Image (tube, coloured by chain):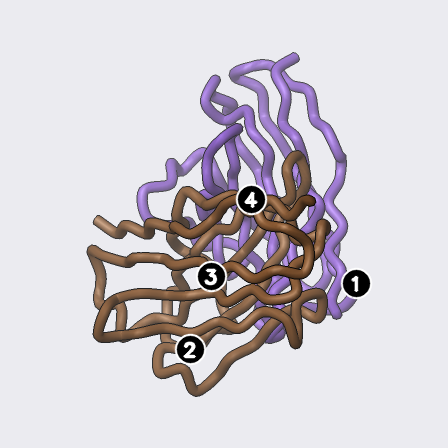
Chain colours: A brown, B purple
Amino acid sequence: EVQLVESGGGLVQPGRSLRLSCAASGFNYNDHAMHWVRQAPGKGLEWVSAISWDSGHVDHADSVKGRFTISRDNAKNSLYLQMNSLRAEDTAFYFCAKGPYGHPSYYFDNWGQGTLVTVSS
Amino acid sequence: EIVLTQFPGTLSLSPGERATLSCRASQSLSSGYLAWYQQKPGQAPRLLIYGASSRATGIPDRFSGSGSGTDFTLTISRLEPEDFAVYYCQQYGSSLGTFGQGTTLAIK
């Protein structure tokens, strides 16, 4: 069974940094692209960042470009999101999601339960 | 960036009825790269349909997807109580996968 477990969320002041992690199990992690998708409370879904199976292809939404960095450690079956210069509008549930193939330009076939990031002073 | 518009915003139906949800893209989606997700309160989204019409693993056959180009439809043939939720479409033909704003399927 595929499991994706996010951690690292919490309350952070504007301008500060936070690092999210996602622990993956139940599938061959090395073969799949991975993503972060966020959802502000009561709002819709927004794709944030994507990374290919080998970290050779990385992409970020314009809203986070230059502030967020996605990375992965295939030896640890883990995905990360380094979030710098956080803003109030970054407040959201952050979901880790798995792609069906190694390239990131696809849909998300499994999701974690999410971790809440609240940016507030 | 491709913009997806879902309609209606809210659909109120009764169990046993047929639901038709629509998703329109601002430009044609290559190879029908459109997915549908279901999200219940407090839960993560769940993949229902990919490639416009292929059901994901474990999804009941009362869920079906259709469409091509810019117009796509999710149909639930006979609503079960557990189907009342928010539904999102997503395009993944470009590297920036974008979502529609969602349709709430509410119990009438």
Q: Nearer the viewer, mark 3 or mark 1?
A: 3
Residue drawn at the location 76% of the way across and 68% of the way down: B27
Question: Image point 67% across, 60% down: which residue?
Answer: A15
Label for residue A52?
Answer: 2
Specify whether disc 4 shares its chain with disc 2.
Answer: yes
**Picture residue at 46% right of the left edge, 35% below the top:** B43
Q: Is residue B79 left or right of residue B88?
A: left
Q: Is label 3 in contact with label 2 (beta carbons under 8 Å)?
A: no
Identity, as a three-letter code, of the amino acid under mark 2? Ser
Horizontal side of B101 relative to A78 (left or right) equals right
**Going by the picture, which residue comes out furthest to the bottom?**
A56
Percent across and percent down for residue A88 are 71, 50
> Disc 4 on helix, strand or loop?
strand
Left of B81 or right of it: where is A89?
right
Give the residue number, with chain letter if any, for mark 1: B26
- Mark positioned earlier in the residue sequence (4 or 2): 4
Q: Position of residue B65 (x, y in %)?
A: 54, 48
